[in-house]
Image (spheres, rainbow, N blue to C red):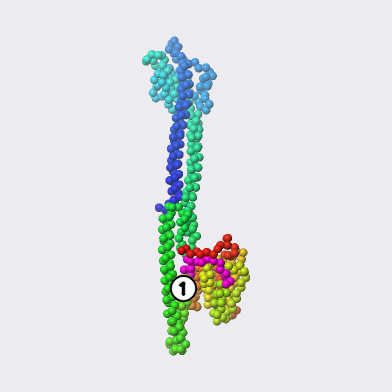
Amino acid sequence: MGPRSLKNQLRLWLLLPMLLVLGVSAALSYSRALHYATQAYDQSLLRTVLALADEVIIDANNEVKIEIPEVASHLLSYNEGDRIYIRIIGPRGKLVFGEANLPLPTKPPAGNQQIYYNSLYKGEAIRAVTFGLPESKAINARNILITMAETTGKRDAMVAEMVEEMLLPQVLMMLLAAIVIELGIHFALKPMQDLRESLHQRSHRDLSPLDTSSSPLELHPLLHAMNALLSRVKAGLQQQQQFIADASHQLRTPIAGLQTQAELALRSHPPEAVQEPLNYMLRSTTRLSHLIQRLLSMARTDAASSQLIVQPVSLTSIIYEECARWIGPAADKQLELEVLIETQQDKVLGDALMLSEMLNNLLENAIQYTPEQGLLAIRLWQSEQSLMLQVSDSGVGIPADQTALIFERFHRLDPNQGNGCGLGLAIVAEIAEHHNASITVSAGLPHPITHHIGSQFTVKFQRYDILPENPRPASTDPQ
């Protein structure tokens, strides 16, 4: 059995009883309308029969006769919308007047009594009354049977009109109630839809508690349980991040010691048999030291993502600070570093430490994979809606089929090249995501010697000066 819709169940339980009530009401309305229409027309039919009985005479030869004027005969044989049939039978069963085949009741009426019944005549439904007229005042006198029948067209029309008059207001009220119920269901379940939309739009890193202030009381147990679960997940992630940070920090000192000892051993001109293992140890410890540094950086990024300090940040200041930090390593490889600031509106809404970490990783990645005497360029400019930060290099470049993979953790284009660990660009992508920014990769600068086409990373931010209502500095700390 598939999942059941709460909205459909509410519709079923609210509308089905109303439909049942309407059906019962329609049946009762039809029954009462038929009763009153039958009663009214039966009385009219009986009065006509009694009027005919007054015209019946018995002559001296005990013959039953009736004298009906021609005009009255035409009126009796036709009524607007219906046809009328008459049959008068003498005490001995002889037809006196009218239709010889008009149906009679199964049991003849007693003297001065009448019987109503339904039947068929000439293929049409009829309603008939038979009156027993005694031929004399004697106790054992036989009866003259006077029968009058009419088709049921006017009766049926009257019943239909009465039912329509009674049911039309009920149907209108039912439709109005259905609309009110549908609106009630929609607004009653809207908090659940809002909760669903809120969860869909929430980042997988956002473990802040769900807002219960505008939720119905019936949802509070579920929301409290979800908030408790989010709190436990958050605590588990924080413990994991703390473990990574602590482990990385504890490993830094012994790894740095091994790296220093390997360098000192190589400077003492060891035998060739020992020199290669020492070189391998130095490369391994260097790579391990770089990995530990990246793990620490990722732990700081993950921790900052849950306590993001949002405020206006000048990208120009961050660019100059990071360039001052990397000018030495760039000069060691004889790299030409160019900075182009092409806008005065250089502010974005974000966390300064995380944005510095993002640019730091982009510059380190560019310097590491750009051959000597290459080119580096940092450019900041604005468009109509956005502020773009661009880092270009003339390094080895990124193959087109690898562009979608470079932002995954521990993914490296060439495991044998450089000391990278595949975490730098993953950190860049996560920081961009936290700042509602997008990052794209394209072809960079040509190397003046190797002629390789490097890589170009463009981070697209929302401009702070055109944000709605120019929001104030705030903190997204869920605590």
Most extreme residue toward the left, as rendered?
A: 140
Asked if residue 358 is positioned above or below residue 333 in the image, the reply reads above
Asked if residue 152 is positioned above or below residue 454 in the image, the reply reads above
> Residue 412 at what x, y percent from top left?
49, 73
Instruction: Answer whether residue 323 is visible to the viewer in this image.
Output: yes
Q: Residue at x 45, y 49 (%)?
A: 8
Asked if residue 48 is positioned above or below residue 479 in the image, the reply reads above
Q: Is residue 280 left or right of residue 372?
A: left
> Residue 205 at what x, y percent from top left?
47, 64
Q: Nearer the viewer, residue 73 or 131?
A: 131
> Residue 466 at what x, y percent from top left?
59, 63
Q: Residue at x 46, y 14 (%)?
A: 57
Decide whether residue 333 is among the magenta residues.
no
Instruction: Answer whether residue 122 is visible to the viewer in this image.
Output: no
Q: Residue at x 41, y 23 (%)?
A: 115
Amino acid at the residue labelled 1: Leu
Q: For residue 96, which quarter of the picture? A: top left
Q: Total label count?
A: 1
Give the residue at mark 1: 296
> Residue 30 at what x, y percent from top left?
45, 34
Q: Secondary structure at mark 1?
A: helix
Q: Residue at x 47, y 71 (%)?
A: 300
Q: Specify start and end residues of the magenta stretch as a single range.
A: 301-317
Asked if residue 371 is positioned above or below residue 157 in the image, the reply reads below
